[in-house]
Image (spheres, rainbow, N blue to C red):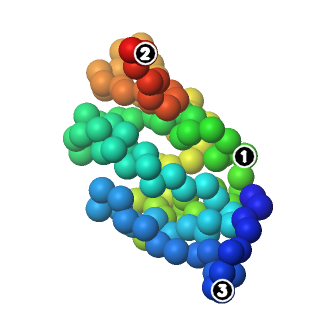
Amino acid sequence: MDVELLAGDADYATEVTENGIRYKLDYSKVFWNSRLITVHSKTVEQFDQNSVVFDVFCAYGNDLNPDAIDFLKQNAKLNKISEDKIEGFVFKLEPNLFKNNSRKKFIFIVKNWKKKKN
């Protein structure tokens, strides 16, 4: 990711907090869009601590960026989230959840919210 420094030190590492979750990131290595906080907040409000959520795309292309995966793991640890719950081929994460007799309720978030047409 190309970043142009306009002034100051070339230190792009930072920590942001959104909805009580801390994220360490480096703007020169990963993408962060703080304008999506409202969308993220509305999405999170739909779940409780017992919800099973599969964000199968996690936006677009983050899974192709090894730095994004590294930050994902660091941030999971920072926020005390088990690393085995955050990355993997969706059908291998918990195969029993996908059986026809599963009683779990699933919420699939597939991609960004669509804008409403006027």
Helix, strand or loop status at disc 3: loop
* Tag 3 residue: 9
* Residue at image location 36% in from the left, 26% down from the top: 106
User: Is 20 rendered above or below residue 103?
Assistant: below
* Residue 95 percent coordinates (x, y): 50, 30
Residue 107 appears in which quarter of the rendering?
A: top left
> Which of 43/83 is in front?
43
Q: Which mark is residue 50?
A: none
C-alpha gap between disc 1 and disc 2: 31 Å
Three-letter amino acid code at the position of disc 3: Asp
In the picture, residue 41 is in which quadrant? top left
Residue reaching furthest right?
2
Circles 1, 2 touching at the beta carbon (< 8 Å): no
Which badge, 3 or 1, comes first in the chain's sequence?
3
Name the N-terminal-most of marks 1 and 2. Answer: 1
Residue 57 coordinates in the image, percent (x, y): 57, 35
In the rendered picture of this protein, how many numbered marks are placed on residues?
3
Task: Point out the image quarter for the C terminus.
Answer: top left
* Cα gap from disc 3 to disc 1, whole angstroms: 28 Å
| Image: 117 above or below 7 | above
Q: Which residue is mark 2?
A: 117
| Residue at horizontal 56 percent and vertical 39 percent from the top | 59
